[in-house]
Amino acid sequence: MQQGKFITFEGIDGAGKTTQIDALEHWLEKQGIEVVRTREPGGTPLGEKIRAMLLADDMSVTAETLLFFASRAEHIERVVVPALERGAWVLSDRFTDATYAYQVGGKNYDPAKVEALESLVQGALQPFKTVLFDLSPDIAAQRLAKARAADRFEAESREFFRRVREAYLDRAQRCARRFFILDASLEPQAITDALLQEAQSWI
């Protein structure tokens, strides 16, 4: 059986990832591909409990980073790897690039510690492709203000999100073959068209 593909989706809060993951999921299913849709933090019963803490409870950046990787370890073992082994495509809303962007970029956490945790938890596992929804913090803030009450991360300053965005773009430059960057300021249909055109090359 052919190994599945692991596709991750990244971007600052308010970038509109959910709508586009929906579109890709439906398109892949029309191609006869089994799709497993998941998210981080979360994706498992334990992971969702950790997610609730991360989004609501004040904590140190070290505790925060460790909890992200605890959720990720469970997610990889119980969801991601089993799905890939049976040939499914895994679509994950966020993965380790988010830790580099939010904790390292946004909160100045030591990247060497994240690299050590990444090695411990993931081993050789890396996404096949990472779709980065690039958006200015100003536009993201306008969108979030209309959407819902902000969680602990969404309530961060625009300067914080500027650092997060820069960290994402730096990751995309360092891992250029893995990343596909979309301009998230475009109309949703234009973004969908660009995403699906790119996805044809993945099959």
Image (cartoon, rainbow, N blue to C red):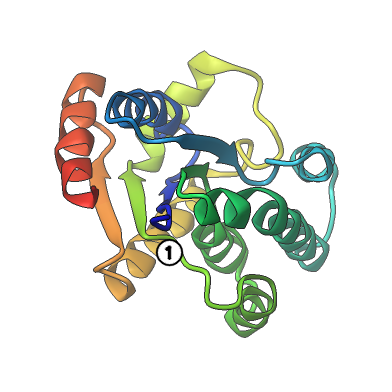
Instruction: Judge left or right: residue 191 versus residue 148.
Output: left
Q: Amino acid at mark 1?
A: Ala
Residue 15 placement (x, y as % from top left)? 40, 35
**Which residue carries the number 1 mark?**
167
Residue with the most extreme front position:
1
Instruction: Judge left or right: residue 109 versus residue 127.
Output: right
Mark 1 surroundings: few (<14), some (14-19) or many (≥20) residues within 10 A = many
Residue 61 placement (x, y as % from top left)? 75, 63
Q: Secondary structure at mark 1?
A: helix
Residue 169 placement (x, y as % from top left)? 33, 61
Residue visible at 66% across and 83% down in the picture: 116
The answer to which of 201 and 120 lies nearer the viewer is 201
The answer to which of 184 and 68 lies nearer the viewer is 68
Q: Quadrant of residue 174?
A: bottom left
Residue visible at 57% across and 57% down in the picture: 102
Residue visible at 58% across and 38% down in the picture: 38
Q: Is residue 115 above or below residue 179?
A: below
Q: Quadrant of residue 151?
A: top right
Q: Quadrant of residue 173?
A: bottom left
